Image (cartoon, helix red, strand yellow):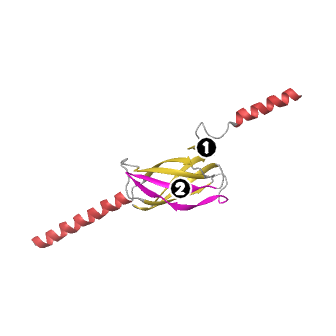
Amino acid sequence: MATLRHLCVSAVAGVLALILCSAHAAEKKSAMIECTPSEEKLVYDCMVMLSSKKSGDMIANAEFTVGADMPSMPMAHNVEPVAAHNAGDGMYHVRITLEMYGEWALKLEFTKPGRDLVISKLVFTKDSVSPAGGKSCGHDHKKHNHKKHEHKEKKD
């Protein structure tokens, strides 16, 4: 009877350990991405700081690829995924080559630990990279249209 009880306790402990490990592996990831232009046109060196969305702990030994797609032109411009390289301490390096300047959605597809997908939108220019929607990106259509109307008024 004691042996049977011991086996049941061991089985329950094993199942709990398996559940906890699976939950950790399936935990959502968060990525902070900083890219800088290289000397080559449309080639960018990116550093990805990877952490757990829930705990904030850095994630070491992840395996993932980084691809890119232009949200403004779906399926027209997409970049073949390339493998990220572990730089240590939850940091990963990837070099991406884009097809043109503008807003791109970087897609990080994880195979380890656990399958996951993280998408980050960035605006790539010749000299810099900034988060999409930031004040330093794009141009102000209202201001541009306002100038256009002023110009037309002067002609009339």
- Residue 126 screen position, x and y as percent: 63, 46
Q: Which mark is residue 42?
A: none
Task: Specify start and end residues of the magenta stretch as a single range.
Answer: 75-98
| Labelled pair 1, 2 in contact (Cβ < 8 Å) | no
Residue located farthest toward the top when viewing the structure as drawn: 154
Q: Residue at x 38, y 49 (%)?
A: 54
From the viewer's perspective, is 118 left or right of 78?
Answer: left
Q: Residue at x 70, y 37 (%)?
A: 141
- Vertical relation: 135 (above or below) 43: above
The three-letter code of the residue at mark 1 reads: Asp
Q: Residue at x 53, y 51 (%)?
A: 45
- Residue 9 screen position, x and y as percent: 18, 66
Q: Nearer the viewer, residue 124 or 145?
A: 124
Q: Quadrant of residue 134?
A: top right
- Vertical relation: 124 (above or below) 61: above
Q: Residue at x 71, y 34 (%)?
A: 142
How far is disc 1 from disc 2 in space, using C-alphas?
Answer: 16 Å
- Residue 12 screen position, x and y as percent: 23, 65
The three-letter code of the residue at mark 2 reads: Arg
| Secondary element at tag 1 | loop
- Vertical relation: 73 (above or below) 1: above
Question: Of label 1 and label 2, which has the lower sequence position?
Answer: 2
Residue 79 magenta-drawn?
yes
Instruction: Locate the C terminus and report the quarter of the image it occupies.
Output: top right
From the viewer's perspective, is 156 left or right of 10?
Answer: right
Type of secondary structure dominating the magenta stretch: strand
According to the picture, the residue beneath numbered tag 2 turns out to be 95
Residue 147 magenta-drawn?
no
Q: Which mark is residue 127?
A: 1
Residue located farthest toward the left when viewing the structure as drawn: 2
